Amino acid sequence: MADQSPVTSGLPDAGGSSTPPRSAASARVIDMGSAGHVLALIRHFGSLTRADILRSTGLARSTVTSRIDALEGAGLITTKEAVAHGRGRPAERFSFNRAGGVFLIAHAGATGVQVAATDLEGTELWREHVNAAVTELSPTQWLSQVSRRFTAALQATGHNASAVRGIGLALPGPVDFEARTLVRPPIMSGWDSYPLADWFADAYEAPVVVENDVNAMALGEQRVRFRQDQALVMVKLATGVGAGIVIGGEIYRGADGAAGDIGHIQLADSGEDPPLCRCGNFGCIEAYAGGWALIRDLRAAGRQIDTVAEAVSLIHSGDQEAMRLSRRAGRILGVALSDVVSLLNPGRLVIGGELADAASHLFAGIREQIYARSLPLATRQLDIVPSTLGPSAGLSGLAAAIADQVFAPSRIDARLGDH
Ligand SMILES: [Zn+2]
């Protein structure tokens, strides 16, 4: 506990949904000794004794007792008597009450949805994959399918609707995080500005977080595997291509929520007639390297396939055309990612998604272009790694995004009043 720097860097966002993202200035507004802050400390370290809290906060003993009583009374922490060492009373340890409710989560790709119930630390209690293509369903059709699975998740885990502390939805399109809507998603007609959060207002008294699918995966990778990383970029290669950026432990969204949407960057000088993209433009990265484009090219070459999984199988089976196309896809992705690396200087580039299962061919092209094109200083510490979390990346990331809101110190303090 000598080094306190991880405490502040690991704190959840101080703002609620109606406040702008935390900046250096707004971070100073946090009352560093409030009950909400004490909860943030306990969540960060897993469990703390009274002496730990006294040391970390500099509060008076009576104030710490009052904070602990308030948090315990609200069911936010649990107390356990530790084994005594030597003489003296055994120290009590205070832990975050991860079982004090559940989060309901739906993480959608283009062709399917992972639906899960997690505890309040994001540990999965129940998970199911649902075949529901957002590209073919209206928002109401998709939401009613997800709602039914949420009900099933609660039944399976033995919870009532009143136990739900937060709901998270991740979708493959640009998200207005504050409005909790999609903004003109290029592949999902009828979803623009649809009020997704309102759907759950009658059934649950819990905040709803709407997030871009790759942003959620990037946050999951950072929080679960690379907690110390200050700058991480996650690239999802599946039916489409997208990226999520996590800076200082939080998702970087840009001014309009479009940051990281690399799939529709147009490739200059490809040396051929640029192919038509799903978005209506020509020559987007995705129109060469997305799963749908690989399927298109493999079918044109006479391979009878319909899914990204089948394209990956062809690559693994050593099909010459499939291998050639995946190497080309890797090089084209590498061109776009070299600009990302020069601009953001990430320490970690995580590559995931269904198509990333064809890793060796894609990774070779990606690495080759990034190291050839990026600034040397920007790649000095760069680590390019495959995602190992699979579907759990997006679910963990959504759970973290919900927890950041629900357990933000300002929100806890508002709920508990003056303690
Ligand atoms: Zn496009």
Image (cartoon, rainbow, N blue to C red):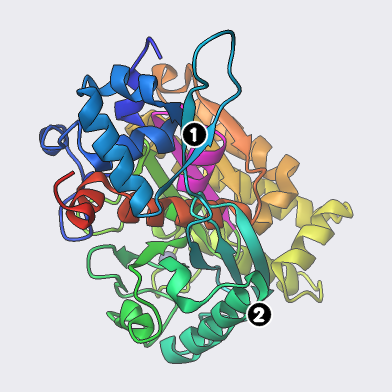
| 360 sits to left or right of 282 | right
Above or below, comparing residue 108 to residue 234 in the picture: below
Q: Earlier in the sequence, mark 2 or mark 1?
A: 1
Q: Amino acid at mark 2?
A: Asn
Magenta span? 219-237
Could you tell me which quadrant the C terminus lies in?
top left
Mark sitting on residue 131: 2
Query: What amino acid type should be assigned to the residue bearing mark 1?
Result: Gly
Measured in 3D between alpha carbons, the distance from the residue under mark 2 to the one under mark 1, in whole angstroms, is: 36 Å
Tell me if 57 is positioned left or right of 342 in this view: left
Task: Residue 46: give its label.
Answer: 1
Rendering coords of residue 373 (x, y %):
46, 29
**Residue 167 visible, this orientation:** no
Residue 7 appears in the figure: yes
Q: Position of residue 157 (x, y in %)?
A: 64, 69
- Nearer-the-camera pick, 282 or 357: 357
